[in-house]
Structures are given as C-alpha cells and as structure tokens.
Amino acid sequence: MALTLMALLLLAAAILTVGGVRGRVPASALIRRIGYGLTVGLVIVTAPRAFEDLGASAGYVLAIPVLLIMALAFADMSQRHVRLITAVVAMALLVWALLLALSVGLAFLPSVLLLLTSVGLEAQRVPRSELTGHRHG
C-alpha cells in the first residue's frame, strides 16, 4: 500500500509540474495523465479482489502496474523520450493485463488504450523533418 501511496504522490507532482500549471497542455499529455490516474485508481479498486484471488502474491501482481506508471511519470517530468517510454509502458501493461486476464488483469485494458492513444497523438505532433532527419532551408 505504501507503493500505491508513493505512486499517487508522484502522479500529483507530475500533473502539477509538467506544463499543467502554466500554459496549455497538449491532448496527448492530458490523455497520458488520465491513463496514469486510471491505472493507479484501478490498482486501488482491484486490490481487494486481487488479494482474495491471489493471496499474498497480489502485492507483487499489483506493484507491476504501479512501477510502470511511476517510470512513465518520471519520463513525463523529465520530458525525455516520453513517446518511447509511453509505448513501452503501454505494451508491458498490455502483456501484464493479458497474463492476469483470469484475475484482475482485464481491468487495465482501458489504461492501455489511453496510453496508446497518447502515443498516436504525440506522433502526429512531431514534424516530418524530425522523423526523417532531413532539414529544409
């Protein structure tokens, strides 16, 4: 539970510091942050069922999504390789959700969809010259 509390504090710090206080937030960042909150919220909501189904190992099962979201929040705060890390976290969370599909895993699929949507929106914002490496002018 301490890990979840730490993740909630980190999430609040990320939302407050990464462009949300001063200026406009791109849609991709907003959707990514909703994905953070949804994932952490799902961990909290599914914890009783996970402990009922899995016993003491539920702590490990629920720690993986929290650790993935914490890594994404650190990337978001540093503004380095956010799109890449978001894609990796989304794929890892998808694999984790499918591995735990018989227990609480499928609850994390909406978070995966939000994170992948964020990656797609972020890809649309990158200028074509930045993707190909060609400079015009």
Image (cartoon, rainbow, N blue to C red):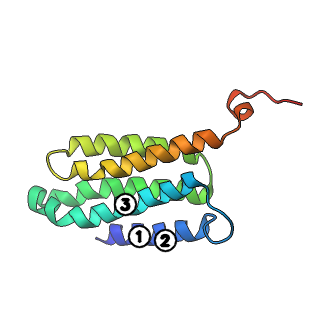
Q: Quadrant of the C terminus?
A: top right
In the image, residue 52 lies at what x, y percent? 9, 62
Q: CA distance from mark 1 to mark 3?
A: 11 Å
Q: From the viewer's perspective, is 113 left or right of 52?
A: right
> What residue is disc 1 on?
8
Q: Which mark is residue 12?
A: 2
Q: Residue at x 35, y 46 (%)?
A: 93
Residue type beneath disc 2: Ala
Residue type beneath disc 3: Leu
1 versus 35 height, above or below: below
In the image, residue 134 lies at what x, y percent? 78, 27
Q: CA distance from mark 1 to mark 2?
A: 6 Å
> Please, what secondary structure does the residue beneath circle 1 have?
helix
Asked if labels 2 and 1 touch by Cβ distance under 8 angstroms, the answer is yes
Residue type beneath disc 1: Leu
Q: From the viewer's perspective, is 87 left or right of 53?
A: right
